[in-house]
Image (cartoon, helix red, strand yellow):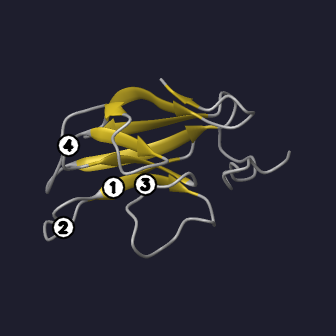
Amino acid sequence: EEEEEDGWEPPPPGPEAPHGPAPLNPSNNCVAVGLASGNFPLEGYMPGWDASSYAFHSDDGGIFHGTGIKVRYYGSPYGPGDVVGCGLDYRSKEIFFTLNGEYLGVAFKVGGGDERDQ
């Protein structure tokens, strides 16, 4: 499988939909939970602000990909005490998030030249 032009390539096949919760640090004003390729710049960008990352932001409940402009509202804003999960379904190439154990639905479809927000 070829790497996408934006540097996004799903990790090698493994569990059907890897998913991991991330407890939040109360000292942060905004947290972005998501996925990024090795091309993602580690300084000066929040996840989701460039083409090599996808993210769900805590401050406004929006999902981001490609720019600092929200793609759309996705779920409730979240903060200290909340647990956010992010997963990738390898078969459908869909990225999804959970908030406090609740599945929020498909956020993005990636790869195969058919990248779009849902």
Residue carrying label 2: 28
Residue 29's x, y, as percent? 16, 63
Judge depth for marks 3 and 2 and give the one in front. Answer: 3
Task: Say what amino acid the circle numbered 4 marks.
Answer: Asp
Q: Secondary structure at mark 3?
A: loop
Q: Secondary structure at mark 1?
A: strand
Quadrant where the image shows the N terminus: top right
Residue carrying label 1: 32
Residue carrying label 4: 60
Residue that appears at 84% across and 48% down: 2
Left or right, 50 with reference to 5: left
Q: Nearer the viewer, residue 18 or 70?
A: 70
Above or below for 53 versus 44: above
Residue carrying label 3: 49
Above or below for 32 versus 115: below
Q: Are the residues flagged by discs 3 and 2 in contact, CB closer than 8 Å?
A: no
- Earlier residue among tags 3 and 1: 1
Residue 54's x, y, as percent? 48, 47
